[in-house]
Image (cartoon, rainbow, N blue to C red):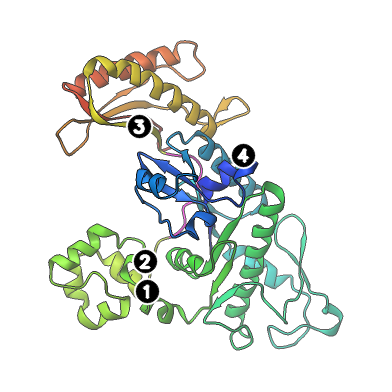
């Protein structure tokens, strides 16, 4: 299997730069709830980090522009545009992860490339003299010339060096996938103005991990047969699924959360590990991931929420709920409405709150009987959501969330 992991570079910042060209090249931060959620590369060069306190950043850099990113409408619209753009280019399954990551299974596309290569009976990886300008292959709808095939690769490979590894068919598949990644990257920049980094690997997680080896705007290829060498040196914190809770579970049993994968393998055997964490994570550390890409079609839900530092009185909930409903319908139109037609109708509306002084969410949901094209749809949603919020709140709240739930099929 050959996967591409596509990560849009500093995505929220890139979206803001599209709306305000004066931001390009300047240090600035996008914050949500007084936390820096992303920042431009110029701001990163100053030493500012993600998740920094926005007020502290303002105090340290009083002239830096700080942009409120709590409304996701711009980012959702740009994310959907780029997803649709990629769908039109790549005739392969695509999975979307959040607003700024996409994964592609290009195994079939790579095989078609190899089958169509204009080569004679030469060792794989070499070209006949008459094909010195490159290889024309059927990748998508048009011929794409993979120029400079033998003599160079504009990207980073793990381990480094093309000549030693691009001889067998498996390695050639990854070399071609690297060229595909370069094509996607360059065409995205020319067509949309956005930049991305792309990782090439034999599993979804490996492609995602190696993507970070050459950011921003880079292509990274993890050669087959070298996956475990790459995995062994990774800190557990870099592995998908090894978030703070998983590492805390290991620490709670006396193991070091700061270990690399190799450290963990030297100190924990499989039975010990499985008493703490699931087998999928153990398999991941041995590059035996079984996850397959799910072709993205539509979201299972769309939600918006607001939080308050002080208790929100019950009397204010209807006012805040109306604001959230407007935002929810706008975001739904961005995500699942094409040419004025809803691709799928929401089946339920759900309201969730966190009461002030309590740690967890409480929620209620209700089936919707009207379709979005009905003139009474918005009124039904508003009435239903207000009733649900009243039922579940009961006392002042610090968080309010409203969501459309869509049928699974």
The disc at residue 238 is 2
- Residue ID for mark 1: 234
Do the numbered discs 4 and 2 sit on residues whose CB atoms are within 8 Å?
A: no
For label 2, the crowd category at 10 Å Cα-Cα, with few meaning under 14, some 14 to 19 and many 20 or more, is: some
Q: What separation in Å lies between label 3 and label 2 (alpha carbons)?
A: 29 Å
- Within the magenta stretch, is there residue 24? no
Of pointers 4 and 2, the one earlier in the residue sequence: 4
Mark 4 closeness class: few <14, some 14–19, many ≥20 residues within 10 Å: few
For the record, the magenta segment spans 292-299
Q: Main secondary structure of the magenta part?
A: loop
* Horizontal arrangement in the rendering, residue 307 relative to residue 48 (left or right): left
**First of labels 1, 4 by sequence position:** 4
Q: How far is mark 4 from mark 2, CA to CA?
A: 33 Å
Return the residue nearer the eye: 369 or 269.
Answer: 269
* Label 1, label 2: how far apart the Cα atoms are: 6 Å
**Given this view, does label 1 or label 4 mark the residue nearer the observer?**
4
Front residue of 137/317: it is 317
Label count reads 4
In this figure, which residue is indicated by the disc labeled 4?
A: 20
For residue 404, above or below residue 187: above
Q: Residue 111, percent across and down?
A: 63, 69
Q: Position of residue 195 (x, y in %)?
A: 61, 55
The residue under the point 16% across, 21% down is: 394
- In the rendered structure, which disc, 3 or 4, sits on the residue that comes first in sequence? 4
- Identify the residue at the far right of this view: 130
Q: Residue at x 59, y 45 (%)?
A: 23
């Amino acid at each position: 299997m050959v996967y591409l992991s596509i990560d849009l570079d500093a995505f929220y910042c890139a979206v803001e730069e599209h709306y305000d060209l004066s931001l390009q090249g300047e240090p600035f931060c996008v914050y949500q709830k007084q936390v820096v959620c992303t920042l431009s590369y110029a701001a990163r060069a100053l030493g500012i980090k993600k998740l920094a306190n926005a007020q502290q950043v303002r105090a340290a850099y009083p002239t830096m522009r700080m942009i409120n990113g709590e409304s996701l409408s711009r980012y959702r619209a740009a994310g959907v545009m780029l997803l649709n753009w990629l769908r039109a280019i790549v005739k392969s399954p695509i999975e979307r992860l959040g607003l700024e990551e996409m994964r592609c299974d290009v195994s079939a596309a790579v095989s078609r490339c190899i089958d169509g290569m204009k080569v004679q009976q030469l060792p794989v990886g070499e070209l006949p003299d008459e094909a010195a300008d490159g290889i024309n292959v059927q990748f998508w709808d048009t011929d794409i010339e993979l120029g400079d095939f033998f003599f160079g690769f504009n990207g980073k490979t793990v381990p480094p060096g093309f000549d030693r590894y691009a001889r067998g068919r498996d390695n050639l598949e990854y070399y071609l996938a690297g060229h595909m990644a370069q094509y996607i990257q360059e065409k995205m920049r020319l067509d949309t103005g956005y930049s991305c980094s792309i990782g090439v690997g034999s599993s979804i997680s490996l492609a995602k991990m190696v993507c970070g080896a050459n950011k921003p705007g880079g292509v990274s290829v993890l050669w087959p047969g070298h996956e475990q060498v790459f995995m062994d040196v990774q800190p557990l914190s870099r592995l998908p699924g090894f978030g703070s809770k998983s590492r805390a579970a290991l620490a709670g049993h006396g193991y070091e959360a700061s270990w690399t994968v190799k450290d963990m393998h030297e100190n924990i055997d499989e039975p010990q590990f499985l008493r703490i964490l699931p087998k999928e994570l153990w398999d991941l550390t041995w590059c035996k991931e079984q996850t397959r890409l799910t072709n993205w079609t539509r979201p299972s839900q769309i939600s918006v929420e607001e939080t308050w530092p002080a208790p929100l009185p019950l009397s204010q909930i209807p006012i805040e709920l109306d604001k959230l409903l407007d935002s929810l319908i706008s975001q739904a139109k961005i995500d699942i409405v094409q040419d004025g037609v809803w691709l799928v109708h929401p089946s339920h509306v759900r309201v969730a709150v966190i009461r002030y002084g309590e740690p967890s969410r409480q929620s209620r949901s209700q089936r919707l009987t009207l379709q979005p094209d009905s003139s009474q749809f918005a009124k039904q949603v508003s009435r239903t959501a207000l009733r649900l919020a009243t039922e579940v709140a009961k006392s002042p709240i610090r968080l309010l969330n409203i969501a459309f739930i869509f049928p699974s099929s």
